[in-house]
Amino acid sequence: MENRPIRIALTKGRLEKDTVGLLEKLGYDCSAIRDKGRRLILPVGDSIEVVLAKAADVITYVENGVCDLGVVGKDTIMEMGGKFFELSDLGFGRCRFALAGKKGGSFYGGYGVKTIATKYPNVARSFFEKKNMDVDIVKIEGSVELAPLLGLSHAIVDIVETGTTLKENGLEVYEEICPISARLIANMVSLKLRKSEIEALIAEIEEKTKE
Ligand code: PRP
């Protein structure tokens, strides 16, 4: 019988606050996360331990079984894939994948292969494959909106939340790709070995996220 706390990998940054809010709604004491300083492994009551990581690393830790559960955006899941179970849609971190570019531009017009800048090359590739459209993809690490402004790409595939970044940079959505939100994922072995604990937690989460 496993005695260590259930270990949850949590995506730092945007999803962190909402996940802490959810755990607090469930009655867990998250003061260690709120006052974390630079600590990365934090106790939440006696039964949960939270690990703060970058989105892609959340998947890596869960896939490898060093974390039982993870909270990560569907954007990272779509880009990385991997061997884990996607248990539930947590309902927060809502945004969307979109194709965007300079305002008034006509992306689908004209000839020649278009260049797409993105942090999500796999998502972009599959989007254009479904359209049978040949594109060149350039991987950018952040502030992808710069690429069409600097003339590196014709358009971007990126996440849009409020639309402010696009608007303030003279860009617009050309086409919506799909909605995104935070997901709870689980390691496949943990789900078997710690079934009752994980199922109880999911039941609590689902009750609270429906409210
Ligand atoms: C994301 C995304 C957009 C922005 C969209 O970037 O890549 O740039 O947020 O949000 P908005 O529609 O509300 O303006 P993020 O802030 O995560 O940082 P990054 O660009 O450095 O990756």
Image (spheres, rainbow, N blue to C red):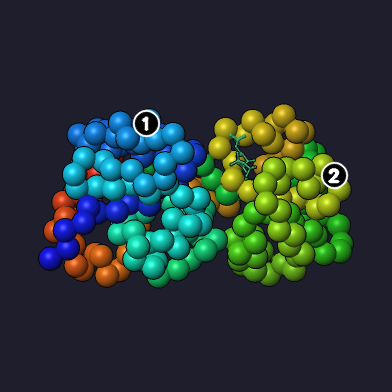
Residue found 82% across the figure and 42% down from its top: 149
The answer to whether residue 127 is visible is no
Tell me, for residue 150, which label it has, or none.
Answer: 2
Q: Alpha-carbon neighbours of circle 1 within 10 Å: few (<14), some, or many (≥20)?
A: few
The answer to whether residue 197 is visible is yes
Residue 164: image location, x then y, percent: 64, 30
Quarter location, residue 35? top left
Residue found 73% across the figure and 43% down from its top: 145
| Sequence-first tag of 2 and 1 | 1
Distance CA(mark 2)–CA(mark 1) = 39 Å
Tell me, for residue 141, which label it has, or none.
Answer: none
Residue found 27% across the figure and 70% down from its top: 189
Q: Quick check: is the Cβ at mark 1 less than 8 Å away from ligand 1?
A: no
Quick check: 133 above or below 95?
below
Residue 204: image location, x then y, percent: 19, 44
Left or right, 160 with respect to 101, comes to left
Residue that numbered label 1 is attached to: 34
Quick check: 26 above or below 135?
above
Ligand 1 position by quadrant:
top right
Residues at marks 2 and 1 touching, judged by CB atoms closer than 8 Å? no
Residue 111: image location, x then y, percent: 87, 62
Q: Residue flagged by tag 1: what amino acid is it?
A: Arg
Q: Secondary structure at mark 2?
A: helix
Residue 61: image location, x then y, percent: 41, 61
Disc nearest the viewer among 2 and 1:
1
Residue found 86% across the figure and 57% down from its top: 110
Q: Alpha-carbon neighbours of circle 2 within 10 Å: few (<14), some, or many (≥20)?
A: few
Q: Residue flagged by tag 2: what amino acid is it?
A: Leu
In depth, the one of 53 and 23 nearer the eye is 53
Q: Quick check: is the Cβ at mark 2 less than 8 Å away from ligand 1?
A: no
Q: Secondary structure at mark 1?
A: helix
